[in-house]
Amino acid sequence: MMTNSRRHFLQLTLLLAFSNAHGQTPATASLSITGQVLKPTQGQTAVFDLAALKQLPQMEIRTHTRWTEGVIVFQGPLLREVLKSAGAQGKRLQAIALNDYKVDIPWQDIEQYPVILALSANGKPLSRREKGPIWIMYPMDDYKALQTPDTHSKLIWQLKTIHVE
């Protein structure tokens, strides 16, 4: 006969395994901003968990991507506001994904366009399976100049770090 504590342990283990197998976002997901950061929160790094990112003013971008069908409503904080909160200053950003994919983003992009850190799509939080929990999103449908392969390469998903140079 199984004890209650053993049964609870097995139930929790199965629940965690099921959640991870279905691309759920872990509660510990966060974004690290490194490099030229004037307001670090951990050592030399400014760290934002999902709750901190959600507390910043949220913006919407309605756009197509080559990885989604139709117009999607993405929601999240402006990248420039997140960087401002970290006291980040520089000329270029290097965005790094969980799989270590890297892309350079000119500082001018975030000044010229309302680039967001998408945390949800069509009102639903982005899981890892859905390119989350954080996906850099440009308003491509709003600006013809952004409808290029170069811009698509900057739509880095599963973002973990932004290095400011």
Image: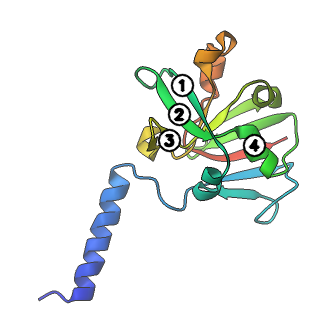
Q: Position of residue 135 (x, y in %)?
A: 57, 38
Residue 101, visible in the rendered structure = no
Separation of residues labelled 3 and 2 (CA atoms): 6 Å
**What secondary structure is found at the residue carrying circle 4?**
helix
Q: Are marks 3 and 2 in contact (CB under 8 Å)?
A: yes
**Label 2, residues with CA under 10 Å away: few <14, some 14-19, many ≥20:** many
In the picture provided, is 75 more to the left or to the right than 48? left
Residue drawn 59% across the image and 58% down it: 51
Residue drawn 56% across the image and 38% down it: 75
Quarter placement of the N terminus? bottom left
**If you read the primary sequence from the N terminus, does the residue marked by circle 2 or circle 1 appear first?**
1
Circle 3 residue: 120
Q: Amino acid at mark 3?
A: Ser
**If you read the primary sequence from the N terminus, does the residue marked by circle 1 or circle 4 appear first?**
1
Residue drawn 42% across the image and 20% down it: 70
Separation of residues labelled 1 and 3 (CA atoms): 12 Å
Q: Position of residue 121 (x, y in %)?
A: 47, 36
Circle 2 residue: 74
Which of the 4 image quarters holds residue 7? bottom left
Q: Amino acid at mark 1?
A: Arg
**Label 4, residues with CA under 10 Å away: few <14, some 14-19, many ≥20:** some
Q: Position of residue 89 (x, y in %)?
A: 88, 43
Closer to us: 158 or 108: 108
**If you read the primary sequence from the N terminus, does the residue marked by circle 4 or circle 3 appear first?**
4
Q: Please, is residue 160 above or below residue 131 in the view?
A: below
Q: Please, is residue 48 above or below residue 145 in the view?
A: below
Q: Are marks 2 and 1 in contact (CB under 8 Å)?
A: yes
Q: Position of residue 66 (x, y in %)?
A: 48, 20
Q: Are marks 4 and 3 in contact (CB under 8 Å)?
A: no
